[in-house]
Image (cartoon, grey):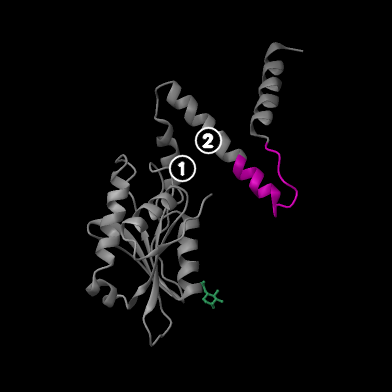
Amino acid sequence: MGYKPLCFGLTCILFAYYIYTPMPENIEEPWKVRIMDAAIKTASLMATILEKTGIKRFDELFSIIIKLDYTQPISDENVTVMDTTFSDIPVRLYLPKRKRESQRPAVIFIHGGAFVLGSYKQTPLDLLNRWTANKLDAVVVGVDLAPQYPFPVPYEDVVSVVKFFLQDKILAKYGVDPNRICISGDSSGGTLAAGVAQLVSCISYISVEC
Ligand SMILES: *[C@@H]1O[C@H](CO)[C@@H](O)[C@H](O)[C@H]1NC(C)=O
């Protein structure tokens, strides 16, 4: 056997070993999880190689991949969706279309991404915010952080958005009940949610870890 096929075979085996993850048996759709896990590991490996060779920073490759998954603010039959800014910070609003006599609750959602990545525009977060608005008949505010600025800028941005939203005239504009506002987030967004909720301790928070 030639040297090249042997190297290729060995590389394939090492790569398969690298991307293999043992899976608990009770997981629904284990293949989907395996494929996603393999894709993330492969991207991490590529990002590491790019960083070690000085071509790109680790997070830059992930930024490019994530941007491929950005959505536009598209309204559907239940929710009006729009991009705007609160205190110069980009936000995406999900406003339920259903008629309602009383004021609505509101959910502020902060995206994750290790403080350096991500956006409310990503498909899964757009679906989640839409689902929340529809299911809870709540106004949802997705906050965009500016990943190019290091911590504590993300925290300061979230504080600005929350303070802007909590103004009486803004809550009245969107028909929000000031006593039923929650702050949530996934991953690093959960950390920011916890931090901001402590600052404005009159409101409760949920943090989702992933
Ligand atoms: C709109 O709401 C109804 C009732 O909750 C649901 O069955 C339907 O799937 C929703 N439409 C969209 C596009 O989410």
**Left or right relative to 73: residue 30:** right
Circle on res. 65: 1
Bounds of the magenta segment:
21-37
Helix or strand or loop: what does disc 2 sit on?
A: helix
Q: Which of marks 1 and 2 is nearer the N terminus?
A: 2
Contact, CB < 8 Å: mark 1 with mark 2?
Answer: yes
Circle on res. 43: 2
Indicate the amino acid at tag 2: Ala
The quarter of the picture where the N terminus appears is top right
Query: How far across and down, in percent of the image, does residue 57 sit?
Result: 39, 30
Query: How far across and down, in percent of the image, does residue 90 sit?
Result: 29, 57
Q: Residue at the location (32% across, 49% down)? A: 155
**Left or right relative to 125: residue 9:** right
Helix or strand or loop: what does disc 1 sit on?
A: helix
**Most foreground residue, 7 or 132:** 132
For residue 196, above or below residue 8: below
For residue 18, above or below residue 166: above
Indicate the amino acid at tag 1: Ile
Query: How far across and down, in percent of the image, does residue 190 sit?
Result: 44, 52
